[in-house]
Amino acid sequence: MLEIEGLTRRFGAKTAVDAVSLSIPAGQMVGVIGRSGAGKSTLLRMINRLTDPSEGRILFEGQEVTALRGAALREWRRECAMVFQQFNLVPRLDVLTNVLVGRVRHVPLWRSLLRLWPEEDKAIALSALEQFDMGALAAQRAESLSGGQQQRVAICRALVQEPRLILADEPVASLDPRNSLLVMEALAEINRRYGITVLVNLHSLDLARNYCERLVGLAAGRLVFDGPPEALTDAVANELYGLEAAEAFGPAEAAPDPGRDRPAEALA
Ligand SMILES: Nc1ncnc2c1ncn2[C@@H]1O[C@H](COP(=O)(O)OP(=O)(O)OP(=O)(O)O)[C@@H](O)[C@H]1O
Ligand SMILES: [Mg+2]
């Protein structure tokens, strides 16, 4: 169980995440939705402790994550693996070695530095690749793969870390629709097969609805929706994406205008 209590993060005068409280049982696949600047990345980064909260607490299985330091903090970072929009692979290293990087906290440091990976860890990494039909790519340089393949390698790297939680920040934002589906399938498969909790930030409401059992909607840092996709009616979705418009332009222009974010198209 991941418990988030009154979590707030301010950057100067800006409140990126505003008193968010959530309780996420183990094994859920949760989509975090909301428009650009809503606070999705900041929320995920606080869970991983890449960013410290200004206020509030995060607890995992009763342990206060926000109080962890040193070795305990490093152990927490192993337990919650991050997947990023830009994959963050080492381009010139082969695919298998990139996946093995996820094993660094499981093998002695000197072995990982010398890349003398134990056979057992190589087998774990290879089997993760095979699970997503990428065993044949193990010896190729990461930079030679397509974006969708690279992201699935990054997911394998996260998986071999043996995390309790996967935090994926816009994992499909740089991918075409077909690869987006493959990557979402891979995350859903890991969630189903291993019961690993997945929190995934998504711009696409469609993907979030199709793959996540629970949606968490943020607008201007505040939690404005928390429920199953069926409960997210078009009206709620409009409210979610239109809240910033209401604040920016006042109640008279509160209705969302689909063209507002696309001035270039509007002018064309
Ligand atoms: N390091 C920072 N310094 C200053 N302001 C920040 C910082 N990180 C985030 N912000 C601000 O906090 C708000 C929330 O940002 P965040 O990146 O969490 O949003 P997001 O929902 O992930 O947006 P996007 O969909 O564009 O990725 C934004 O207004 C952003 O400008
Ligand atoms: Mg973001």
Image (cartoon, rainbow, N blue to C red):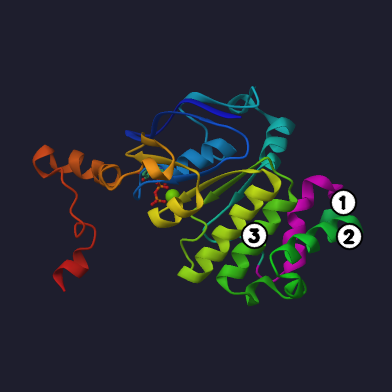
Find residue 89 and report its horizontal and vertical position in percent: 64, 62
Find residue 129 and report its horizontal and vertical position in percent: 73, 64
**Amino acid type for the residue under numbered disc 2:** Leu
* Of the two numbered discs 3 and 1 in the rendering, the one whose residue sits closer to the viewer: 3
For residue 95, above or below residue 23: below
Near mark 3 (Cα within 10 A), the count class, few <14, some 14-19 or many ≥20, is: many
Kindly tell me whether residue 204 is visible in this rendering.
no
Look at 32% across and 39% down and name the residue there: 220
Q: Nearer the viewer, residue 2 or 220?
A: 2
> Label 1 near label 2: C-beta < 8 Å?
yes
- Please give the range of residues in magenta: 91-110
Near mark 2 (Cα within 10 A), the count class, few <14, some 14-19 or many ≥20, is: few
Residue matched to label 3: 154
Q: Nearer the viewer, residue 209 or 9?
A: 209
Earlier-in-chain disc, 3 versus 1? 1
**Amino acid type for the residue under numbered disc 1:** Trp
Please check the rendered image and state whether residue 95 is part of the magenta-colored stretch, yes or no.
yes
Residue matched to label 1: 110
Distance from disc 3 to disc 1, alpha carbons, whole Å, reads 23 Å
**Amino acid type for the residue under numbered disc 3:** Ala
| Left or right: residue 17 compared with residue 87 | left
In the image, farthest residue toward the left: 252
For residue 144, above or below residue 90: below
